[in-house]
Image (spheres, helix red, strand yellow):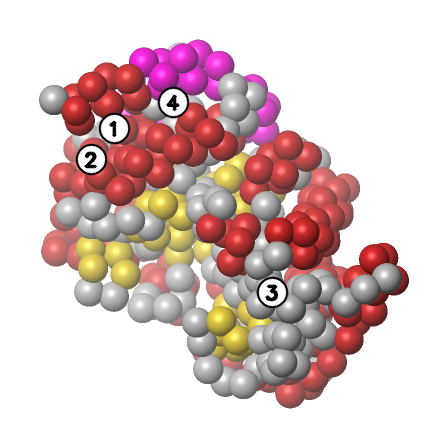
Amino acid sequence: MAMIETRGIWLTTTDSKVLRSKERIAEAMDFLAETGFNVVFPVVWNQAVTLYPSQTMLQNFGVEIDPMSVGRDPLEEVVVEARRVGLKVIPWFEYGFASSYNLNGGILLQKKPQWAGRDRNGNLLNKNGFEWLNALDTQVQEFLLNLVLEVVKNYDVDGIQGDDRLPAFPCEGGYDQLTLTRYRQEFNRNPPQNPKDRQWLQWRADILTDFWAHLYQQVKAVNPNLLVAIAPNIHDWAFQEYLQDSPTWLKRGIVDIIHPQIYRRDFRSYQAIADKLVTQQFTDTTLSKLAPGILMKLGSYCISPEYLVQAIEYNRQVGIQGEVFFFYEGLRENNHALAKVLRNGAYAKSASFPTLSDLSRGGGSNKKSAAIWQGVARFLRNL
């Protein structure tokens, strides 16, 4: 029987030139197919510009495409070249509800200041350098939905992907006039000044979840076979800091495949989070949807070959059938060292990317073997 696994990689415009020419894209797709990958997640929304000609952006902001890509359509080039070598393509809306990074809102909020997220002091919402659109505003939500819909309607893609900014909103936000009015109408009082008040967190998270449920339905209305993927931060930190309620997404069936970002720089830390996901967050029916994000490269950091192998092996031991790596350039470091490790080891035999029915099949037997492996792992750690 053919092996079914998610073997994915993110393609970025940050610290990477792979999307900057058709030739580079073609060469990258050959390289990924030879290495054993079966799906690519190319960025299509980053730094407030799209990597495809967007009517939504043109109409709202007068900017049709990323200035570095004028005269091209990088997304279409990825689709054509990926199809040529049998890779799936799931465009990644990296920027989500962010507006800018250290640019005071950038072009989006210059043009539409009413779309700004606000903290409890009425200031533009800023968290870790990112300024944010108001993700709770229906107009802002409609804008993001339209970006997603023009991609699924105009390109031969296999799905779309949100991340730690989609659907997401810093917990410090929600103090804009629109949201304050909405909350007062519902509860006859002002929201708590403490942004981490549990009821206030949940109320705002539910608005984001409802938005994503609507987006899920709209994408499926275009084509029911399209996959809706999300790469959130780790629960429950993601809920408290960014209102990402992944257990509810799974319960409501509004995500087909999920890639929690287990971005840890040593195997033990990775293992501890993978254990927690498998035993606490995922059930027999949802485990098949899990393919974690693994940090391969960031700045000067690059994963060691040992840790890379351990993470994939551990995933399979606990019933996780796949992973997605951040990001492509890590495979190219040190004369393609990590690509060679994959090609000659875990990814030596080819695997099919899961279909929608594979992903909704559950992972009952995986779960049982996972429990056994975790017992063994705990025993060994305590020796």
Left/right of residue 155 with respect to residue 100 in the rendered view: right
How far apart are labels 2 and 3 at the CA level?
43 Å
Q: Amino acid at mark 3?
A: Asn
First along the sequence among labels 4 and 1: 1
Q: Secondary structure at mark 2?
A: helix
How far apart are labels 1 and 2 at the CA level?
6 Å
Please name the residue shown 69% across and 72% down the image: 175
How far apart are labels 3 and 4 at the CA level?
40 Å
| Rendering coords of residue 240 (x, y %) | 53, 54
Give the vertical position of 186 relative to 104 (above or below): above
Q: Which residue is mark 1?
A: 313
First along the sequence among labels 3 and 4: 3
| Rendering coords of residue 360 (x, y %) | 58, 24
Q: Quadrant of residue 279?
A: top left
The mark closer to the camera, 4 or 2, is: 4
Quadrant location of the N terminus in the rendered image: top left
- Disc 1 + disc 2, Cβ < 8 Å: yes
The foreground one among 372 and 326 is 372
Give the vertical position of 316 relative to 332 (above or below): above
Left/right of residue 256 with respect to residue 234 in the rendered view: right
Q: Which residue is mark 2?
A: 309
The foreground one among 172 and 54 is 172
How far apart are labels 3 and 1 at the CA level?
43 Å
Q: Amino acid at mark 1?
A: Glu
Q: Quadrant of residue 123?
A: bottom right
First along the sequence among labels 4 and 2: 2
The mark closer to the camera, 3 or 4, is: 3
Q: Which mark is residue 194?
A: 3
Q: Which residue is mark 4?
A: 319
Please name the residue shown 36% across and 17% down the image: 371
| Rendering coords of residue 120 (x, y %) | 63, 75
Magenta residue span: 349-373
